[in-house]
Image (spheres, rainbow, N blue to C red):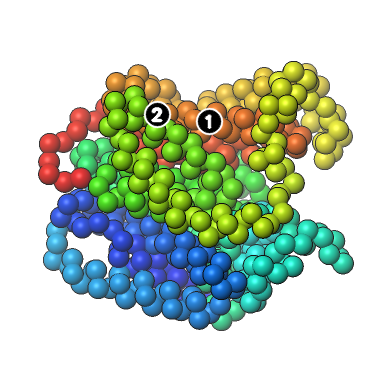
Amino acid sequence: MMGFLGGLLVVLTAYLAGRLLMPNRTHYARSRYEELTTSILLGLATLMTAGMAATWALGTFSFGIATLLSLGFAGGGVWRIRREWKQAVEPCAFPVWERPLMLSLAIGSVAMTLAWPLNEFDPILHFGLKGKLLFGGESIRGEAFHALTGEFGRIMTHPNYPLGIPIMEAWSAHFAGEWSDRWIQFPLAFWAFCLPGAVAFGLRRFGAQAARRGALVAACTPILYVMEFLHRGALDFAEAGLGAEKMLGGRGDLPVAAFVALACGLLLRGGRCRFLAGLAMTAAILSKNEGLALSAVLLLALALGALWNRGKGLKEFVLVGSAIAVLASPWLIHRTTLPAIDENYTEAVSYETVLHYWQEDESADKSPIPAKLYGEEWSEQSHWRPARIARYFGSEFIDVLSWGLLWLLFLLGIPQALRTPEIRWLLLFALGGLALYALILLVTPWFLIALHQKGIPARLILHLLGPIALLCSRVNQPKQDDPVH
């Protein structure tokens, strides 16, 4: 029970922190659903960023730090709610018959996340171990966070993985007074709950129907919850948090997707939301290493979009870039002191490596099992990596059980996106993200078939769900002539 209450308290604190930072209702219209979901995501981004800054400054993340930050953000959030108590909100964009669907998907995603304790490799060793060390008072500058090997074998699997998720887990444990492998996931259970609402908030300036469509496109994309929806009947739901088929739980891909969606939605709203978009991308950086690479792609897309539009949109590039540079600096500075992960893509992405995998067939030297056990995927298909990557991406694009109609809508929306100046950067970002992940898979030192069987290509592409849902839902919606952002 204490674990449940501790996690619930962190989520409530995140909501209040998000309400503190949310722009005024009068100038940035939204429904209560959009306000709730966007506030939770924005608050989680705030707690991650503030927690990382405090941990970097003091070396540890203690109960005292968690309490002081929570009191400050919660107090500010309560003040903001009281101040805006009588301000009107927009009506819910969903008709009555759609509301049970959205509610069941939202609540179901939370329930599925909490159905099992941490039980997979990534959630336990990449994030949970660090969270438990932080809860136990270990210094992030100590051997526990820096040493690769110890007396009993390997200590830290991915030492330079970000600390955002471990900080949220430690925050829950501090408030509960104990570590619970189930309930420390409580703040991590709301990514799928909140992502569609963040998409709707971004599209609200284009009308209620655009917001409704965006939320439905995002919420009804099956991979937000599980790969190959109902392919095995109800078994995936019965096994909830088990196996690589699930996106829910303590892994880092879903929070990256949620924060990227939030950042893109905030950029569409403009005004002061542009700085908050930088905060959201900082949280993506603090969730997983891919967040840093996606931040670079986003900034490049904004810059190219501004050039395409004859300078219009350059302010977005400056504000988002400045916010990321300031807010992410504690982690980026600390990251330089940490050993790299095994695949060390900073060094792997080189002309020589790209040329090697472009010219040479892949060998099975690094296969974790005999290559013949992969069957036709190894024996009868091309061993040329670019062809294999194209096949993997293509199989994702036509996998309706995982992606629904998302990729068809994206393909149909590209021509109009090219003709719509305000969302060209979204198209550039989505295409740039796909190119980035194709490059990462090209130079990875791991055996590519093994990564595919673990669902790695799908988990990477998931990060782009938000911007693609925003683009698909905007292209056929004329902009409203109203005074709100």
Taking the image as shown, residue 276 lies to the left or right of residue 48, namely left
In the picture, residue 435 is in which quadrant?
Answer: top right
Residues 333 and 145: in front is: 333
* Callout 2: SS: helix
Q: Is residue 273 visible?
A: yes
Q: Please state the horizontal and vertical placement of residue 35, each as a whole percent of the image.
A: 28, 56
Residue for badge 1:
434
Three-letter code for the amino acid on which mark 1 is drawn: Leu
Q: Residue placed at 20% from the left, 39% from the top? A: 207
Amino acid type indicated by mark 2: Leu
Closest to the camera, between mark 1 and mark 2, is: 2
Q: Residues within 10 Å of mark 1 (few under 14, many from 20)?
A: some
Which quarter of the figure is the C terminus placed in? top left
Q: Going 65% across and 72% down the picture, which residue do you hit?
A: 139
The residue at the point 68 percent across, 57 percent down is 338
Quick one: label 1 or label 2, which is nearer the N terminus?
2
Q: Is residue 350 left or right of residue 430?
A: right
Q: Which residue is mark 2?
A: 304
Helix or strand or loop: what does disc 1 sit on? helix
- The Cα atoms of the two marked residues, 1 and 2, are separated by 17 Å
Residue placed most toward the observer, 165 or 381 = 165
What is the quadrant of residue 212 in the picture? Answer: top left
Q: Position of residue 260 (x, y in %)?
A: 44, 45
- Above or below, 63 against 30 in this view is below
User: Residue 366's quadrant in the figure?
Assistant: top right
Residue 412 coordinates in the image, percent (x, y): 38, 21
Residue 149 lies, in percent from the top left, at 82, 60
